[in-house]
Image (cartoon, rainbow, N blue to C red):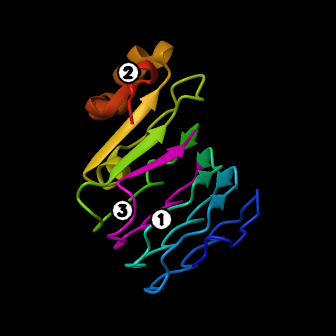
């Protein structure tokens, strides 16, 4: 049980929590909070990889900016985690969430909350979004919705983009 474990860093270096709990099959509860505001390259990659008995995810993820492969394979193989996981973001590298939920429950839903964005971020490639998992939603500010769904590369995933006012968990 890592529920009371404090990971207080608000600034992370690259690979900060890479493989931290990887393969801990007895781990059932994750730390409640990941307060870092910026997750650089592979910061959370493989953090809970194959923690097959884990039944929780952090309640608070402070991160707003996700770097290259920041959360890659973070929950890969965690078959018992909640069905909805929400991360707030204002900026993310297109590979930030690659394979994040690969080989998890097919009912898992991944929500990228982009409602704090004041403009549409560039998305150079959508490949990382396709490998998130089977079901994902990108929630955007109402006033940016039309710009978002028509923006380069975002238009390819427009079926996953919803207005903040239309989103229900």
Q: Nearer the viewer, residue 70 or 58?
A: 58
Picture coordinates of residue 22, whole percent (x, y): 49, 81
Badge 1 local density, few (<14 within 10 Å), some, or many (20+)? some
Q: What stretch is highlighted in magenta?
A: 66-89
Badge 3 local density, few (<14 within 10 Å), some, or many (20+)? many
> CA gap, disc 3 to disc 2?
27 Å
Instruction: Give the quadrant of the N terminus.
Output: bottom right
Tell whether label 1 touches label 2 (CB within 8 Å): no
Q: What element carries label 1?
A: loop
Of marks 2 and 1, the one in the foreground: 1
Q: Is mark 3 on a helix, strand or loop?
A: loop
- Mark closest to the chain's N terminus, 1 or 3: 1
* Above/below status of 118 relative to 45: above
Q: Which residue is drawn at 34% across and 73% down?
A: 77
Q: Residue at x 40, y 35 (%)?
A: 138
Tell whether label 3 touches label 1 (CB within 8 Å): no
Badge 2 local density, few (<14 within 10 Å), some, or many (20+)? few
Res 99 label: 3
The residue that label 2 is drawn on is 166
The residue that label 1 is drawn on is 56
Check if residue 148 falls in the magenta segment. Answer: no
Q: Nearer the viewer, residue 94 or 84?
A: 84
* Residue 42, picture quadrant: bottom right
């Amino acid at each position: 049980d890592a529920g009371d474990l404090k990971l207080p860093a608000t600034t992370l270096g690259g690979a900060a929590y890479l493989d931290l709990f990887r393969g801990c099959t007895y781990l059932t509860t994750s730390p409640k909070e990941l307060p870092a505001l910026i997750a650089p390259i592979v910061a959370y990659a493989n953090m809970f990889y194959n923690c097959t008995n884990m039944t929780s995810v952090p309640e608070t993820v402070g991160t707003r900016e996700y770097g290259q492969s920041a959360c890659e394979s973070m929950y890969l193989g965690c078959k018992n985690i909640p069905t909805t996981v929400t991360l707030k973001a204002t900026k993310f590298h297109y590979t930030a969430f690659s394979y994040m939920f690969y080989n998890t429950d097919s009912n898992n839903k991944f929500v990228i909350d982009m409602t704090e964005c004041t403009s549409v971020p560039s998305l150079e490639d959508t490949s990382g979004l396709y490998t998130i998992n089977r079901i994902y939603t990108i929630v955007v500010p109402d006033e940016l919705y039309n710009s978002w769904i028509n923006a380069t590369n975002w238009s390819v995933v427009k079926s996953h983009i919803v207005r903040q006012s239309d989103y229900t968990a």
